[in-house]
Amino acid sequence: MPRMTGNQLAVKVLEVRPDLPIIICSGYSSNLNGDQLKMAGFFAARQKPLGRNTLLVQVARALEEKG
């Protein structure tokens, strides 16, 4: 994404689909705290690297809460 950050992309996606649970996975996600995530409309943030099981659990939680 040469012209925007993942954070900026997520905000644009939420403008179109506000019901979509977005999980930010970044080496820099520690800069966002839980309150900032909720205010931005994000579901969660996870620090890279993250294992497959951690990702699967987080996706399942997001789907369960949004479903």
Image: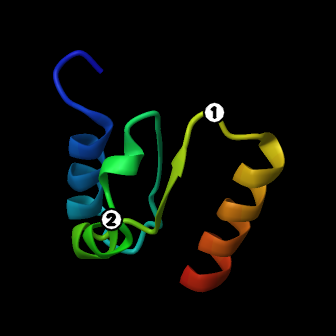
Q: Nearer the viewer, residue 22 or 19?
A: 22
Q: Is residue 46 left or right of residue 19?
A: right
Q: Amino acid at mark 1?
A: Pro
Q: Which mark is residue 49?
A: 1
Marks 1/2 in contact by CB < 8 Å: the verdict is no
Residue at x-position 76% and y-position 40%: 51
Residue 60 placement: quadrant:
bottom right
Residue 66 pos. (x, y %): 54, 81
Q: Is residue 66 left or right of residue 59?
A: left
Residue at x-position 54% and y-position 51%: 46
Residue at x-position 38% and y-position 71%: 34
Q: Which mark is residue 59?
A: none
Residue 61 pos. (x, y %): 67, 73
Q: Earlier in the sequence, mark 1 or mark 2?
A: 2
Q: Nearer the viewer, residue 45 or 62?
A: 45
Which residue lies most toward the top here?
2
Q: Which residue is mark 2?
A: 17
Residue at disc 1, secondary structure: loop
Q: CA distance from mark 1 to mark 2?
A: 27 Å
Q: Nearer the viewer, residue 29 or 11?
A: 29
Residue at disc 2, secondary structure: loop
Q: Amino acid at mark 2?
A: Arg
Residue 52 placement: quadrant:
top right
